[in-house]
Image (cartoon, rainbow, N blue to C red):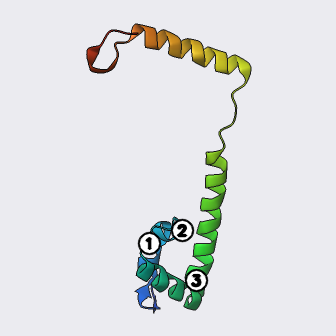
Amino acid sequence: MVHDREVGGIRCTEVLAHLSDYLDGEASPELRERIEAHLRGCDWCERFGGAFASVIRSLRAELTEPQPLPGEQRERLRRTLRRRLQSEPGPAGDPPA
């Protein structure tokens, strides 16, 4: 990485490596503090981190709300699942229910 400064006791590459954990709230309090200090002092990482966070928020919003299937597709899927469940053995080789 061309841009790899140490700011706030952590390098840009380390911030990028832990950015997902930071955004998910899974970083330790000490790491979170170091990342926030770095972001306050590194305009490059602040811009990248902001853009990354925006993409993650958008993906979460899109992926958490499933789109309903149109009625015809929903019924076709149900029929297919029903057929498969009736023709395949259950767990551990049990006969189908």
Residue under the point 59% across and 75% down: 48
Distance from Cα at disc 1 to Cα at disc 3: 21 Å
Name the image quarter holding residue 45.
Answer: bottom right
- 79 lies above or below 92: above
Image coordinates for residue 1, horizontal then vertical, percent: 44, 78
Mark 1, other Cα within 10 Å: few <14 / some 14–19 / many ≥20: some
Task: Return the residue nearer the eye: 75 or 1.
Answer: 75
Distance from Cα at disc 2 to Cα at disc 3: 17 Å
Q: What's the residue type where badge 1 is placed?
A: Ala
Image coordinates for residue 40, horizontal then vertical, percent: 58, 88
Q: Quadrant for the C terminus, please.
A: top left
Mark 3, other Cα within 10 Å: few <14 / some 14–19 / many ≥20: some
Distance from Cα at disc 1 to Cα at disc 2: 8 Å
Total marks drawn?
Answer: 3
In terms of secondary structure, where does tag 1 sit? loop
- 47 lies above or below 71: below
Sequence-wise, the earlier of marks 2 and 3 is 2
Image coordinates for residue 61, horizontal then vertical, percent: 66, 52
Q: Which residue is mark 2?
A: 23
Q: Which residue is mark 3?
A: 44
